Every structure is written in structure tokens, then in C-alpha cells.
Image (cartoon, helix red, strand yellow):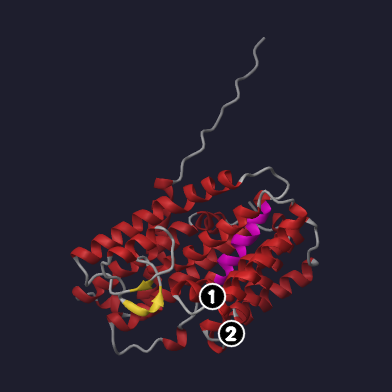
């Protein structure tokens, strides 16, 4: 795996943690107005582009059946997500005040387990699963399904077929009567996955940016991502946030990171980014509960609270990563004798 992808995964995960940590501040101190510091939601768009890139990179030039592809993705995504979903459902049933954005509802729970879009009974204005950040996984699994169905096709046709399929889905969803499914799958955000696969094709064709321009475009991409998060509403994120995310990933894959110092900690957080993303809601809920129930003045300070959210979410994600990730056995070569 390209090390820059790991770095971007780490940044994207921590951006989302930061975003949700800022949302917690008014809940621990109503006098705090942190709306001016509300950034990081765009980490999701980086994840989506990265996902498309990685899926193309790991399947191009290889004989991969849809079943093999699905088995690998399910093994990576489903166990932790199901565990987190069931845990959330139990907490919502036993202690509903802990997770304020979740209430126990059996149909909602089943839809969440199956990665199907469903209106959240706790907030009927949103289409989110039991583990609210898991809405991104509903899109991920949909992308994996479409991508897997196209794997038997000749690789030369696969990329245009993917774009064509997503375009057809968007058109059909906008022509059909408005439902939860057509609303969810009719969002152009799914094109970010397709853009990532195109970047994967460019990378394998060695159609990359010169190093100097890549660094410049990387900085410009992050700058526009930061600016557009304030200027462009979430419903228009597919271009306002998605295009800068595409520039960021394209720039990063164009840079030769082998000549740069290796940042082991950041690389590890990239490895654990999925676990950080899935578990950070629980970590933040715990910190919020502690801050509200115990007179710990430091936790009322917004900077300290946000830093603790970032650090503890990373630690918890890393611990879960260590628990659920199988360790590869190291083979020691025998010394020749005689």
C-alpha cells in the first residue's frame, strides 16, 4: 500500500473525529459557540475517493471474482460494524440518554445491519443507521456491490461501465418518485468513488503530475477543501468538497514519498483509520458523559476537550485494531549447514 494513502486515511479519520468533537462542545458547555471552528466533515469525501482508488489498484490486472472481492470486503468491514451497531442498539435500549442520536427501533436496526438506507427514528430528517457515521458505509457497500458486479467484464470496459452505471442510477433515482432509497442513492456523492477509480487508472498508466506541481496542487486542494466547507452546503458536497478531495488524492499519489522521512505513527493511524472512524462516536459519548457528570474543569475547556477527543479516539481505535487484525506470522529462514 502506498504510504501516502495511509497518511491521507489518518488525516481523514482525524478530520471526522475533530468535526464530531466540535459538535459535542455545546452539549458540555452551552455557553460555547464553536460554529466558527466546525470543520472536518470533508474527511468523508477524501475517504470515498481513496476507496475508489484502492479498489481499482488492488483489482487491476488480477483475476478477481465478485465472490472473492465481496468476501474480502465483508471480512474487513462487517464484523466491527455489526458489533458497534448491536452495542449501540443495546445502549439505546438500556440507557437511551447516553447516545442522544440513537433510539432503539427494530426495523432501523435490521436495515443498519444490512447496510440499507433508513430514516433515523431519532431524527426523521436524516437517513442514517444506528451508528450514525455508518451512513458512509452504506455508500461504501453499495459501491462495492456495483464494482463487484463489473469485475467479470474486460478491464478495458470496466471503468466506463462504472461511470455509466452510476450515471444511470442517478438519472433513474431522480425520475422515480421520491423515497428513502431514491433520495439516498440519488446523491451525486457516489461519483466520488468513480473518480477514485479513474485516479487508479491514471496511476497505473503513470499519468501523474510533476513533483513540484503535485505539492502545489496538494496544498491548493486542502485550502479549497477548508474554504469550501464553509461556503458550500453539504447537499452540494459532490463538487464543492469532492473536487478538492480528488485533487488531494491525485496530488498525493503523484508525489514520490519514498524520498521523504517515513512517519510511522501516521502510517499506523492510517492502518487503524477504519477502527477509529467506527468507534470514535462511543469515545466522544463517553467523554461527554464524564464532562457532564463530574466536576472536572479541564473537560469544560473546549481546546482540552477536543484534544482529548482526538487522542483517546486514536488510542481506542488503535486498541480495537490490534484486537481484531490478525497478525502475520513471521517465517524465520533456516541457516544452511555444511
Q: Position of residue 39 (x, y in %)?
A: 49, 80
For the point 66% across and 51% down, which residue is it?
151
Is 264 covered by the magenta stretch?
Answer: no
Residue 282 to residue 126: above or below: above
Instruction: Report the front residue among 178 and 317.
Output: 178
Q: In the figure, is residue 114 to the left or right of 48?
A: left
Q: For this rendering, which residue is in front, 282 or 4? A: 282
Q: Which residue is disc 2 drawn over?
A: 228
Tell me if mark 2 has few (under 14), some (14-19) or many (20+) residues whose alpha carbon lies within 10 angstroms of its own. Answer: some
Counting labels gives: 2
Residue at image position (62%, 44%) is: 65
Tag 2 near tag 1, CB within 8 Å: yes
Q: Earlier in the sequence, mark 2 or mark 1?
A: 1
Picture coordinates of residue 112 (x, y %)?
38, 62
User: Which residues lie in the magenta part?
Assistant: 45-57
Image quarter of residue 299: bottom left
Secondary structure beneath label 2: helix
Q: Nearer the viewer, residue 281 or 220?
A: 281
For residue 218, which quarter of the picture? Answer: bottom right
Magenta stretch: helix, strand or loop mostly: helix
| Residue at 62%, 59% in the rendered image | 5
Disc 2 and disc 1: Cα gap in Å?
Answer: 9 Å
Residue 7 x, y percent position in the rendering: 58, 61
| Most foreground residue, 198 or 264 | 198
Label 1: how many Cα within 10 Å (few below 14, some 14–19, many 20+): many
User: Residue 101: percent from the left, percent from the top?
Assistant: 31, 74
Q: Which disc is residue 75 wearing?
A: none
Which residue, given by chain and number where applicable, does mark 1 sit on? Answer: 42
Amino acid at each position: 500500500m502506498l504510504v501516502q494513502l495511509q497518511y491521507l486515511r489518518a488525516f481523514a479519520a482525524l478530520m471526522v473525529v475533530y468535526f464530531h468533537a466540535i459538535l459535542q462542545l455545546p452539549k458540555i458547555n452551552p455557553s460555547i459557540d464553536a460554529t466558527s471552528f466546525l470543520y472536518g466533515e470533508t474527511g468523508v469525501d477524501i475517504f470515498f475517493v481513496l476507496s475508489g482508488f484502492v479498489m481499482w489498484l488492488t483489482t487491476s490486472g488480477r483475476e478477481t471474482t465478485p465472490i472473492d472481492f465481496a468476501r474480502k470486503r465483508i471480512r474487513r468491514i462487517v464484523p466491527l460494524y455489526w458489533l458497534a451497531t448491536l452495542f449501540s442498539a443495546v445502549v439505546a435500549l438500556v440507557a437511551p440518554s447516553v447516545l442522544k442520536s440513537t433510539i432503539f427501533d427494530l426495523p432501523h436496526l435490521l436495515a443498519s445491519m444490512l447496510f440499507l438506507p433508513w430514516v433515523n427514528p431519532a431524527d426523521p430528517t436524516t437517513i442514517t443507521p444506528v451508528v450514525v457515521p455508518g451512513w458512509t458505509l452504506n455508500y461504501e457497500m453499495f459501491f462495492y456491490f456495483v464494482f463487484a458486479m463489473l469485475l467479470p467484464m474486460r478491464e478495458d470496459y470496466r471503468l466506463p461501465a462504472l461511470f455509466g452505471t452510476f450515471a444511470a442510477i442517478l438519472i433513474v433515482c431522480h425520475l422515480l418518485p421520491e423515497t428513502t432509497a431514491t433520495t439516498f442513492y440519488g446523491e451525486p456523492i457516489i461519483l466520488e468513488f468513480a473518480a477514485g477509480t479513474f485516479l487508479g487508472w491514471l496511476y497505473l498508466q503513470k499519468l501523474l503530475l510533476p513533483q513540484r506541481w503535485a505539492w502545489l496542487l496538494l496544498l491548493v486542494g486542502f485550502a479549497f477543501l477548508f474554504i469550501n466547507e464553509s461556503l458550500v452546503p453539504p447537499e452540494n458536497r459532490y463538487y464543492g468538497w469532492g473536487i478538492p478531495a480528488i485533487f488531494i488524492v491525485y496530488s498525493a499519489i503523484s508525489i514520490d514519498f519514498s524520498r521523504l522521512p517515513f512517519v510511522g505513527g501516521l502510517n499506523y493511524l492510517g492502518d487503524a483509520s477504519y477502527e477509529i472512524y467506527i468507534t470514535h462516536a462511543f469515545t466522544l459519548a463517553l467523554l461527554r458523559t464524564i464532562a457532564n457528570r463530574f466536576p472536572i474543569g479541564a473537560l469544560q475547556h473546549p481546546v482540552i476537550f477536543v484534544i482529548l477527543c482526538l487522542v483517546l479516539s486514536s488510542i481506542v481505535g488503535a486498541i480495537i485494531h490490534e484486537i481484531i487484525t490478525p497478525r502475520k506470522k513471521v517465517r524465520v529462514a533456516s541457516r544452511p549447514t555444511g
